[in-house]
Image (cartoon, rainbow, N blue to C red):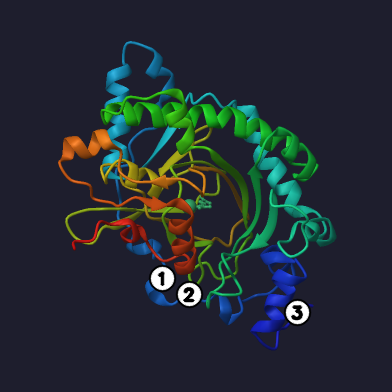
Amino acid sequence: MAPSFSDRRSLLNFIVQEGNGIKGLADSGISKVPDEFVQPSYARINKLEMKRHHIPPPIDLYQLDGPNHDQIVEVLTEAAENVGFFQVVNHGVPTQLLERLKDTAHQFFNQPTEKKVIYLEEVRSNPFVEYGSSFAPEKKEVIEWKDHLKMTYGGDAEALKYWPEECKEVALDYVKTATKTVKRILEVLLIKLGVTLYDETADAYIASKTVTMNLYPKCPNPELTVGIGRHSDIGTLTLLLQDEVGGLLAKVEDEKEGHWIEIPPIPGALIIIIGDALQILSNGRHKSAEHGVGTTNTQSRVSIPLFVRPQLTDRIGPLHQVVERDGVANYRQVLFDEYMKNKFEHGHVAKTIDFAKMTVT
Ligand SMILES: O=C(O)CCC(=O)C(=O)O
Ligand SMILES: [Fe+2]
């Protein structure tokens, strides 16, 4: 029989403290989501209102090494400046690895709860791994329909020691190959901005790496819920693998207030999302994409982002070559840790980049 929850506390106990997750709730056979999952109407992204939008074909990264190099750089730059996301193929991450990642994510979440609870924030013994649900479910009024396993890279030895046995090899392989892809993309974007790059410089902007496995279980009320609310990613770039289910939504700016589109799954492709750190570094040329995830009642979905960002102890601000060219710095220097804390205080509510805006004194 489906469990019933007398109040929010007992619901959170079941999902968070006992570690049953959203998956546990979905598997219990509920026919309607508890009220705590019902998003206020302004926070929902209505699929019906989504405009038809021409989705550009994925960008072939292989061509960066051939005669069409300059043309591909143009296309990448245009996407980074105008929409903040794009899809790539021939990206250097083998298809077989992508398939293994998706299978592994399902395998991890399909395990009995007692295998997963050892990675709960309150229980785990190290900072490199975290299993949980929603975004700050204890603090936020409305709960998101998502479970996650976060694996933070702190070196190979730590990954092999602390990441879950069933995920560690495939996740480590992903960090290594995908980091090369991300670095290459970042380099061409920065060079195009006029930045002279020494190896360490690009590395500093991608120094911290986290692979997350997200699970969005089948949801009885997709029209009322979100998997992840609208947000922009905090880091430099996100490289995202989504499965064939779909549900990733992004906001495209236009003359009015912008409109939402679905970023469709393309077999073998990866999605690149510009994060806030790159918007700041590029003095606002590159736009971090506002995005979110819908839910569906047809099947459960997995996605596996690799987030790269500067270290928390780094200060970041617009790169001096860009400021010289633009004649003005649009953002101040911020300690990345401070930027992150401010963002987390707000949770998933659109963009928080104004925190780094230059204030007129
Ligand atoms: O699941 C997705 O497609 C996107 C995930 C995402 O936006 C995130 O984890 O920040
Ligand atoms: Fe995101």
- Residue drawn at (49%, 62%), measured in percent from left and top? 341
Going from the N terminus, do you reach mark 1 or mark 3 first? 3
In the rendered picture of this protein, how many numbered marks are placed on residues?
A: 3
Residue holding disc 3: 3
Farthest-out residue, top? 67
What is the distance, in whole Å, between disc 1 and disc 3 at their CAs? 27 Å
- Residue drawn at (77%, 45%), measured in percent from left and top? 162
User: In the image, what residue type sits under mark 2?
Assistant: Gln
Give coordinates of residue 278: x percent, y percent. Answer: 37, 43
Q: Are marks 1 and 2 in contact (CB under 8 Å)?
A: yes
Q: Give left or right: position of 302 versus 239.
A: right
Relative depth, front residue between 360 and 80: 360
Q: Give left or right: position of 73 versus 150.
A: left
Depth check, mark 2 against mark 3: the one in front is 2
Residue holding disc 2: 39
Q: Secondary structure at mark 2?
A: loop
Farthest-out residue, front? 361
Going from the N terminus, do you reach mark 2 or mark 3 first? 3
Q: Secondary structure at mark 3?
A: loop
Q: Secondary structure at mark 1?
A: helix
Residue holding disc 1: 43
Residue 46 higher or lower than 75, as above or below: below
Q: Quadrant of residue 339?
A: bottom left
Q: Say whether residue 292 is visible.
A: no
Ligand 1 is within 8 Å of the C-beta of the residue at disc 3? no
Image quarter (top left, top right, bottom left or bottom right) of the N terminus: bottom right
Give coordinates of residue 230: x percent, y percent. Answer: 42, 61
Give coordinates of residue 101: x percent, y percent. Answer: 66, 38
Q: Quadrant of residue 291?
A: bottom left
Residue 107 higher or lower than 226, as above or below: above
User: In the image, what residue type sits under mark 1?
Assistant: Ala
Near mark 2 (Cα within 10 A), the count class, few <14, some 14-19 or many ≥20, is some
